[in-house]
Amino acid sequence: MRPAIVYLILLTQVPVLFTLYYSTTNWNLLRPERTRFIGLGNYLDFIQNPDIATIMQNTLVFGMILALLLNRQFRGRAVARTLLITPFLIMPTVSAVMWKDMLFHPVFGLISSFLVSIGGPRIDWINDFPMVSIVTIVGWEWTPFMMLILLAGLQSLSQENLEAAQIDGAGPLATFRFVILPHLSRYIEIAVLLEVLFVLNIFGEIFVTTTGGPAIATTTLTFDIFEEAFLRWNIGRASAYGIVAVILANIVMMLFVRIIRGESRKEERI
């Protein structure tokens, strides 16, 4: 067996095997001497947990809103592209602190200050609109990623198709709807697929701004795994929840792959 394959197995599969093992135990770091094998107990706890429905809803709503926010196209100059890529290069925790203290703060934030200057109310965005605040922060961070994918799609669009549409009398809106948007559909699907997978990794923004609150209003599955592991010290349950998250991510990926393959077959028939 080649060293590179051995390295990949050790790096990826061994942690998964340990996680699977821990998920079948009740290992708690505060009570390690009581660790014992409980089989599927942690997975049953996941199903029976009354907060899981809200947590999963937050994860799905968060992912859907983020995907919709990122479905946009951009064509501009090199300088503008560089500036728009900048948010993608900023650390998530830094972005969260910047938005929380400089923009969303009810007293010192620029948004509230602007609203007050025009006679509006002073709003505590993080507490009053926690989910909207987090979606705004993450959407701002990941917009450059979507922009780069769609920009690659736009650059692959043949100018002859655009010129043909203009000769046929199509205006800007009609050209976008019937020429540009169909051409970008495949790129949009790929970008949304990646975003749905990446949304399971979003943690820093929630930790810095809302810590999953108020109550569990902004607690996603990823943040709940963190709380189980490092606040309640329940490694067994956190491992089980992590396995569930991996399974859900694979289900979403397979659904999108089937959709993309189905559309490819339709195009081949046409």
Image (spheres, rainbow, N blue to C red):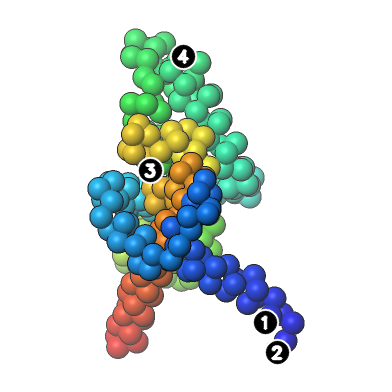
Earlier sequence position, callout 3 versus callout 4? 4
Earlier sequence position, callout 1 versus callout 3? 1
Q: Are marks 4 and 1 in contact (CB under 8 Å)?
A: no
**Residue named by callout 1:** 5
Local secondary structure at mark 1:
helix
Indicate which label's residue lies in the foreground, 3 or 4. 3
Q: Are marks 2 and 1 in contact (CB under 8 Å)?
A: yes
Q: Mark on residue 165?
A: none
Indicate which label's residue lies in the foreground, 4 or 1. 1
Question: What residue is shown at x 54% (from left), y 57% (from top)?
Answer: 148
Could you give the CA–CA distance between mark 1 and mark 3, rounded to whole angstroms?
37 Å
Residue 121 position within the rendered picture, expressed as x and y whole percent measured from the top left: 33, 14
Local secondary structure at mark 4:
loop
Q: Amino acid at mark 1?
A: Ile
Viewer-side residue, 48 vs 200: 48
Q: Are marks 3 and 4 in contact (CB under 8 Å)?
A: no
Residue 267 position within the rendered picture, expressed as x and y whole percent measured from the top left: 33, 82
**Residue named by callout 2:** 1
Viewer-side residue, 250 vs 184: 250
Question: What residue is shown at x 49% (from left), y 38% (from top)?
Answer: 207
Local secondary structure at mark 3:
loop
Earlier sequence position, callout 4 versus callout 1? 1
Q: Quadrant of the N terminus?
A: bottom right
**Residue named by callout 3:** 219
Earlier sequence position, callout 2 versus callout 3? 2
Please say if 121 is above or below 153: above
Q: Are marks 2 and 3 in contact (CB under 8 Å)?
A: no
Could you give the CA–CA distance between mark 2 and mark 3, rounded to whole angstroms?
43 Å
**Residue named by callout 4:** 107
Could you give the CA–CA distance between mark 4 and mark 1, rounded to whole angstroms?
55 Å
